[in-house]
Amino acid sequence: MSIVKINVLTVPAEQREVLEERFASRAGMVENSDGFEWFELLRPVEGTDRYLVYTRWRSEADFQAWMEGPMRAAHQGRGDQSGERPKPAATDSTVWTFDVVQQAAPAARAAE
């Protein structure tokens, strides 16, 4: 069954828009990766300054291949016109890993 990687990013309030814009500008980068199943960027509503970056993968090997290939290339290539890398929007990052052991989807509803 699949694995889930959740990157927990501590993002100060003044950097939220920067973080969201950076993720929006990278749209499409992960979607074509072998073994990729799902992505969500979750913005905190209350009680925390942590964003959650949720990705779901067919296997740990697929995730690692993406980290060593497209992900690494994307982070190395990020720079402004002077070649300088922008300051990170997050002040801390932790990755959580989970095995998917159960899942459910909405039941199909009968036409009325």
Image: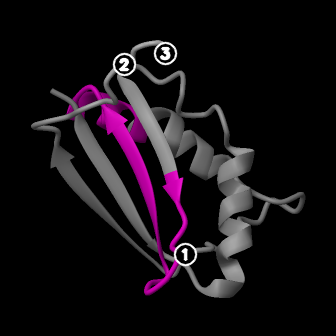
Spatial distance from mark 3 to mark 1, Cα to Cα? 48 Å
Asked if one can make out residue 86 in the rendered structure from this viewpoint, the answer is no
Asked if one can make out residue 16 in the rendered structure from this viewpoint, the answer is yes
Spatial distance from mark 3 to mark 2, Cα to Cα? 12 Å
Residue 41 shown left or right of residue 54 in the figure? right
The amino acid type of the residue labelled 3 equals Glu
The amino acid type of the residue labelled 1 equals Ala
Q: Position of residue 71 (x, y in %)?
A: 50, 42
Q: Does the segment drawn in magenta span residue 53?
A: yes
Residue position marked by numbered label 3 in the rendering: 112
Which segment is the magenta one?
A: 41-67
Task: Characterize the local packing of mark 3: few (<14), some (14-19) or many (20 or more) Cα atoms within 10 angstroms.
Answer: few
Spatial distance from mark 1 to mark 2, Cα to Cα? 40 Å
Q: Are marks 3 and 2 in contact (CB under 8 Å)?
A: no
Residue in the foreground of this view, choosing between 110 and 67: 110
Q: Residue at x 73, y 69 (%)?
A: 18
Which mark is first along the chain, 1 or 3? 1
> Which label lies toward us, 1 or 2?
2
Residue 18 vertical position relative to residue 38 in the rendered view, above or below: below
Residue in the foreground of this view, choosing between 15 and 102: 102
Residue 35 shown left or right of residue 87 in the figure? left
Residue 68 shown left or right of residue 40 in the figure? left
Q: Residue at x 44, y 84 (%)?
A: 48
Task: Characterize the local packing of mark 1: few (<14), some (14-19) or many (20 or more) Cα atoms within 10 angstroms.
Answer: some
Residue position marked by numbered label 1 in the rendering: 90
> Which label lies toward us, 3 or 1?
3
Q: Residue furthest left?
A: 101
The amino acid type of the residue labelled 2 equals Ala
Q: Tell me, for residue 108, which label it has, or none.
A: 2
Q: Position of residue 68 (x, y in %)?
A: 40, 38
